[in-house]
Amino acid sequence: MARAGKKFMVDTSPTKAVVVNSLTRDATVEACIFDLIDNAIDAAGATSRHALLEDLPNELLESYLGYEISLSFSGKSFKIEDNCGGISVAALQGMALRFGQRSSHEGGIGVFGVGLNRALFKLGAVSTLTTDTGSSGAAFKLDVATYLEAAGWQLDAEERPSSGKPGTIIEVLQPPSDISRDFADSDWVAKIRSEIGQRYGRFIAKGLSLKVNGKLAKAAPVLIREDGPVDKEYKLYKDHGVSIHVSYGQHPDYRFTNEAGYDRAKNASLTPEFGWTVLCNDRAILVADTSWKTGWDNFHTEFYGFVGIVEFVSKDANKLPWHTTKTDVDLNNSAYQLALADMRKFAEKWRQFADKRKKGSAKGEKLRPIPPPTPPSAPPSKPLSPQKPNGTKGAPNPPAPTIKPAKKQDHNQSRMVLPQDVDEKHCFDKHLALVHEAKTLDLGIHTYAGLALIRLLFEASVRTYTIRHGHADALKAFAIEQRNTARGTPLTPKQEAEVSGKMEEMLLYLQKTPSIWGTGKAPFIRPSLAKMVKHMPLINGVMHNPFQPVNRTVAFDIRDEILPVMRHVIEN
C-alpha cells in the first residue's frame, strides 16, 4: 500500500531511439550531406584563424585555397574526406558527437550540434570516422543497431598515431534502400553536385575545392547585372551583432522586351533563377526563392528578371536566421525581420519600374543600358596560389589564408566622404543613394564635389531624421516662425504649405532643440553640430561662389569634425 507523502523521482530521460528518430525524421538526405560539408568547412576556418597572428578585420575568411573536400557516392556506401585540419581527441571525446553541443567556431556554419550525428544515423547502418590533426589521430565505428540497444550514450573510440597529414574521413555503409538508389543514380549525383555549387559557391570562389565522385563542383553564385537599365541597389546595416547586406537588381542574362538583345526563349530558361537568395556566413540557405518567406505575396511575370541577395554575417552563428537543417530561414529572427521589410520595398521598386517600362514599351521607347564604369588604373595584384605540399606523402600543409588581413581603418585614415561602416538601416531611395556616393567619393581627389555632397547629404539626413523621430511638424513650424519674423509679415497659407525647412533653419532648430538627440547624447553631438554651423559659410561658398578656393586638408578637417553629427542623423 502506497504511503501518503512519500517523495519519489519521475524519470523523464529520453530513449536513444526517440532522440535519433526525432533527429533524422524531417532531415533530407541532401541536408545531412550538407551538414558534413559544413563541418569540414568550419574545421578549415578554425585552422586558418588559428594560423593568423591578428584578428580578422571582417567576420569571414577571404581565402580557402589549399583546402579540399571530396564526396564519393555509390549504391553501397557514401564517403566524405577532407584535409581541413581534423578533429582533436578532446573534441571527439566531449563535443563533436554530443547531441545538441553547439559549435563555437567563430564565423562558422556548422552551428547546431546535430549535423554529424544526424548524418551518421540517417545515411546508413554502419559508419566509420578516422581523423588526424597532424599531431594526433583517432577513430571510431558506429553500428546504429548496436548503439541503440546499448544502455549508455558513449561510443568506443581509440587514439591512433598521427600520419602528419591533417584531415578527416567519414564512410557510411549499408544505406537504406531508397538512399542507396539515389547514391547509385548518376542523375541524382549530378543534381547534388550542382546544388553544392549553389550552396557553397562563395567558398568555392574563395578557393575551396569540392569534388563529387571525382568531378569538381562549379561555383554558381548569384550575380546582379551592373550595366542594365535597372539600378543595382543595396543596403548595409547591423542588428545585435549581425551584419545585414541587402541588394537587388536585374539578372545578368535577362533582357526586357524593349531592350537590345531580347530573347524570349532565353528569358524563359532563366525563370528558376529569379527571386531572393539568402546567405548566412557565405552559406546559401534559400536559393532563388519566390515564396512568402522572402516577402512575395504573388510572384508573377511582372517580377521576371528580378534577382535579390540577402547576406547575414556574424561571428556568433547562433544569431543568424537559419533553421537546424540550414535549408530554411527563421522568420522570427529580428535580423531577418529587418531585412524582410527592405526586401519587400525593393520588390515594390522593381514592380514600379516594370510598370513604367511596359508603358514606355507600348509607346515604342527603347531601354538603354547604363555605361559601364571606367576601372581605375592599378598595378596588377599578385595571384593567389595554393599551399605547397610538405614532405609527407604529398599532403598539403595545414593551409592558412594567403592574404594577411589589414588592420581595420578608422575614419581618419579613409579618403572617402563617409566611412564604410556607417549603418544604412534607416536609409532608402535618394537618401540611400547619397550615402553610397559618400562612401565611394574620394574627398582628396574630388574636394569640391565632396564638400557639396556633404551639404546635400547632411540636409537629406536631417530631414529624414526629423521625420523618423516625429519632429517634422515642429521643424516646419519653427521655419515658418523664423521667416515671419524676418519678413515682418506672416506667410500666406500657400507659402506655409510649401515650407519644409532650409539648411540654416534646420541647423538653428537642431541647436535650440537638444532633446532631439536622445537621452544623454546631446553633450556628444552638439560640439560637432557647432562645427557644422561654423563651416557652413565655406561649404555654401563651394556651392555658389565660382572663385572660392578650398584646400584639401581643410576639406578633410571639415569631414572629421562634422562626422559625429552626420553619423548620428543617418544611423539613429
Image (cartoon, rainbow, N blue to C red):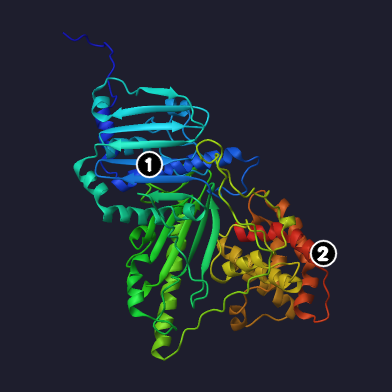
How far apart, in angstroms, are the residues tagged by discs 1 and 2? 58 Å
User: What x and y, as percent, mark residue 406?
Assistant: 67, 50
Q: Residue at 45% of width from left, 60% of height from top?
A: 221
Q: Position of residue 429 (x, y in %)?
A: 54, 70
Question: Residue at horizontal 43%, vertical 27%?
Answer: 138
Q: Residue furthest bottom?
A: 363
User: Going 64% across and 64% down the picture, which residue do you hit?
Assistant: 439
- Horizontal side of 291 relative to 413 (left or right) equals left
Instruction: List the residue tagged with mark 2.
Output: 553
Q: Is residue 106 visible?
A: no
For residue 195, which quarter of the picture? bottom left
**Vertically, is 59 above or below 431?**
above
Picture coordinates of residue 432 (x, y %)? 57, 67
Q: Is residue 83 visible?
A: yes
Element at label 1: strand
Q: Nearer the viewer, residue 489 or 57?
A: 57
Residue 256 shown left or right of residue 5 in the figure: right
Q: Residues within 10 Å of mark 2 (few under 14, many from 20)?
A: few
**Earlier sequence position, callout 1 versus callout 2:** 1
Q: Is residue 139 above or below residue 340?
A: above
For residue 80, which numbered disc appears in the image?
1
Describe the element under mark 2 as helix, strand or loop: helix
Which quadrant would the C terminus be assigned to in this image? Answer: bottom right
Placement of the N terminus among the 4 image quadrants: top left
- Frontmost of labels 1 and 2 is 1
Give the amino acid type for the residue marked by disc 2 in the picture: Thr
- Residue at the (45%, 55%) spot, across then down: 201
